Each structure stands twice: as C-alpha cells, then as structure tokens.
Image (cartoon, rainbow, N blue to C red):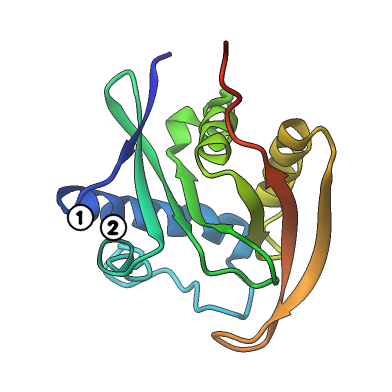
Amino acid sequence: MNIKIISATKDHMPVIQNMARFYAYDLSKSCGFYELYDWSFPENGLYEAIDLSKYWEEPNRYPFLIRVDNEIAGFALINKIARLPNTDWNMGEFFIVGKFQGKGIGKRVAFELFDKFPGQWEVMQMPPNTPAIKFWKKVIADYSHNQFDESIITIQEPKPHDSNIFRFTAQGKKQED
C-alpha cells in the first residue's frame, strides 16, 4: 500500500470537515454514553463535528490529509496546544477511515508524523475511548521503545473531565550517511 501524508490546504478543509462526521460516528461507539458531550443521534441522520477551520486559520496548527493508493483514508490534526508543561506537540485529532483501520496504516502515519515533528509529544483520549487508548499505547510504546508516560489528568474545558494522556519524546528521522 502506498501511504501519503499531505499537508492539507484550505481546499481540503471541507473534505476533512466531512470526514469528521465519520470520526464522530466512530467515537460514538465507545463514547456514546459519555456525558461530556451530547452523542444523541441527530434527527437528520448526520453527526455534526466540531468546527475544524481553526487548523487553517490559526498559527501552530498543522492539518494533514491521509491517502492510501490515491484514495482518501483519513486525517491528522497536530497543534501546539498542550495540557502539560514543556510539550511541543499535541495530536489534536487523528482518524483513519474504517476500511483502512486494523491494517497498520494508522501506526505508519503516526510514526511518520512523530518523525516530522521532533520534540515532546502528548496524545490524549477520553477515558471511555478504550479502542483509541489501546491503539495509542501500542503505537507510542513501539515508537518510543517503551519510553513514555501514561497518566490521567483533569481538563477544565468544555467542563471538568478526566482525560487519558500519553507523553513521550520523538527524536525525529535520523539522517542516513
């Protein structure tokens, strides 16, 4: 499989915003009864997603479109909005389309993004999102050779709630001689 991670332009914004509906649907499977957000299935049959336009409008935000064999396969949204001190990068949102899940694509994309943005990272998940926690724990353990921290922290917005957080250092891609 040919995997490409493309810096998303403003032309990609509606595509990623549309995919975010499927991201919300996927999240509803594990977080549907989590009281932090209203996960009621909409009467019009279309999940809404948070407005992601800030990734194209504000500094220190980096949107990416993921393609597999020229087919749209997901997105990754990276930012510098950290919850813990001395953090360089935060995985804001990460989504692989169902068709491509469980095939190692997410791991390969995550590794490439970690290499692209060296420094201290944090990756957070809502506690009921056990599939994401399991995925990120495995990916980060493999990437960091088990050199990571995992903890639960309390986030204040949109209202106080716990969040699972992984913290590790990405060394970046080593240059070959």
* Local crowd size for mark 2, using a 10 Å CA cut-off: few (<14), some (14–19), many (≥20): some
Could you tell me if the residues under marks 2 and 1 are in contact, i.e. CB atoms within 8 Å? Answer: yes
Instruction: Give 7 or 104, whichever is nearer the viewer.
Output: 7
Which residue is at a point 80% across and 69% down the rendered structure image? 152
Instruction: Give 45 or 134, whichever is nearer the viewer.
Output: 134
Which residue is at a point 58% across and 25% down the rendered structure image? 104
Please name the residue that numbered disc 1 is placed on.
14
Can you tell which mark lies on residue 165? Answer: none
* Disc 1 residue type (three-letter): Pro
Give the percent coordinates (x, y) of residue 11: 14, 49
Which residue is at a point 75% across and 44% down the rendered structure image? 137
Q: Using the image, determine if residue 30 lies above or below residue 161.
A: above
* Local crowd size for mark 1, using a 10 Å CA cut-off: few (<14), some (14–19), many (≥20): few
Q: Is residue 161 left or right of residue 55?
A: right
Please name the residue that numbered disc 2 is placed on.
17
Q: CA distance from mark 2 to mark 1?
A: 5 Å
Of helix, strand and loop, which one carries label 1? helix
Q: Using the image, determine if residue 76 lies above or below residue 36.
A: above
Name of the residue lying farthest toward the top: 177
